[in-house]
């Protein structure tokens, strides 16, 4: 379980990018983080993985905290950031070997895992080339492979489907579902509402740094007393004036 208690983060000491967030993400679920641009989704994900330190509050992953048990806390999850432009001078293989070394993936299984994952995502024949020469989508695939290679309990993915071609996106969604079905957590952010609607168990909508809703899409419909599409519900929650204009 991931427990987020009263988490606040400000970049400038004035405006809160995360404003007293409270959220529990349960084992075995895919939770989709939705929200307009600048809502605070990446800030929350970066706070969970320890790239940013929240100004207050506490985050626990499977009972561990970054402050008390940094190494084991970090071993609980894999993280794919929203920027796949990392370590561009390495080849694909060198990047994956680096990740496998850092996370101590046993030598006897890493090549089989890399071969399987790179095959699944269709970039096996590119791994000897420098990441510099990869397209955006290929870089994204490599970051995803690096994360899954480690095979941790929790997947934390910031817009993981951006840039993936339809086949790779389908593979990714299938892997996310299978991981959650094994009892693990998949937490990801997305702007693609159809993906959220079809894939997630629950959604968490963040708006202006605050949680506007957590629950199933059905529960959101009931709350808003509205049988509309998720897109309309999303607008109603995050931008009621725009939703009224669309209705008119
Ligand atoms: N490094 C930074 N320095 C200053 N302000 C930042 C920084 N990163 C984010 N912010 C601000 O924090 C707020 C939340 O940004 P965040 O990136 O978390 O939003 P998001 O929901 O992930 O947005 P998007 O959907 O556009 O990726 C925004 O107001 C943004 O301008």
Image (cartoon, grey):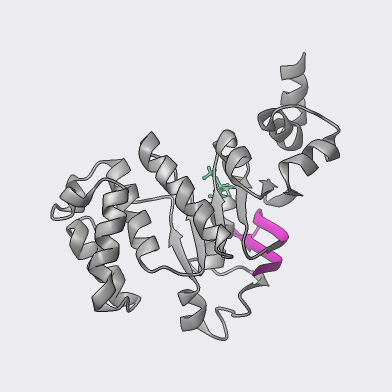
Residue at 53% x, 85% y is: 69
Q: Nearer the viewer, residue 35 or 16?
A: 35
As for residue 6 lying within the magenta part, the answer is yes
The quarter in which the C terminus is drawn is: top right
As for residue 99 lying within the magenta part, the answer is no
The rendered magenta stretch, by its main secondary structure, is classed as strand
The quarter in which the N terminus is drawn is: bottom right
Tell me: residue 56, above or below residue 207.
below
Query: Can residue 160 be seen?
Result: no
As drawn, which residue projects farthest toward the bottom? Answer: 68
Query: Can residue 47 be seen?
Result: yes
Q: Nearer the viewer, residue 122 or 53?
A: 122
Q: Position of residue 82 (x, y in %)?
A: 43, 50
Q: Position of residue 2 (x, y in %)?
A: 63, 68
Q: Position of residue 179 (x, y in %)?
A: 51, 59
Q: Nearer the viewer, residue 134 or 7?
A: 134
Residue at 71% x, 61% y is: 23
User: Would you identify the image quadrant in which residue 190 lies?
Assistant: top right
Q: Position of residue 198 (x, y in %)?
A: 60, 39
Exactly how many numbered labels are in the figure? 0
Residue at 55% x, 63% y is: 182
User: Would you identify the image quadrant in which residue 246 lies?
Assistant: top right
Q: Is residue 99 left or right of residue 62?
A: left
Q: Is residue 104 left or right of residue 70?
A: left
As drawn, which residue projects farthest toward the left? Answer: 128
Residue interval drawn in magenta: 1-23
């Amino acid at each position: 379980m991931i427990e987020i208690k009263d988490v606040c983060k400000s970049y400038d000491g004035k405006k809160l990018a995360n404003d007293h967030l409270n959220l529990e993400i349960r084992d075995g679920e895919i939770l989709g983080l939705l929200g307009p641009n600048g809502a605070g989704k990446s800030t929350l994900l970066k706070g969970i993985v320890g790239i940013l330190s929240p100004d207050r509050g506490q985050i626990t992953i499977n009972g561990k905290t970054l402050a008390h048990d940094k190494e084991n806390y970090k071993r609980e999850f894999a993280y794919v950031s929203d920027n796949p432009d990392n370590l561009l001078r390495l080849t694909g293989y060198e990047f994956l070997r680096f990740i496998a070394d850092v996370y101590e993936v046993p030598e006897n299984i890493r090549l089989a895992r890399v071969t399987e994952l790179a095959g699944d995502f269709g970039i096996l024949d590119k791994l000897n080339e420098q990441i510099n020469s990869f397209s955006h989508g290929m870089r994204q695939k490599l970051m995803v492979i690096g994360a899954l290679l480690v095979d941790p309990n929790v997947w934390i993915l910031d817009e993981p489907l951006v840039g993936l071609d339809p086949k790779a996106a389908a593979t990714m969604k299938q892997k996310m579902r299978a991981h959650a079905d094994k009892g693990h957590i998949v937490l990801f952010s997305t702007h693609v509402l159809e993906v959220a609607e079809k894939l997630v168990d629950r959604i968490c909508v963040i708006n202006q740094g605050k949680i506007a809703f957590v629950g199933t899409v059905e529960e959101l419909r009931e709350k808003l007393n509205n049988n509309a599409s998720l897109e309309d519900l999303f607008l109603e929650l995050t931008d009621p004036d725009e939703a009224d204009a669309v209705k008119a």
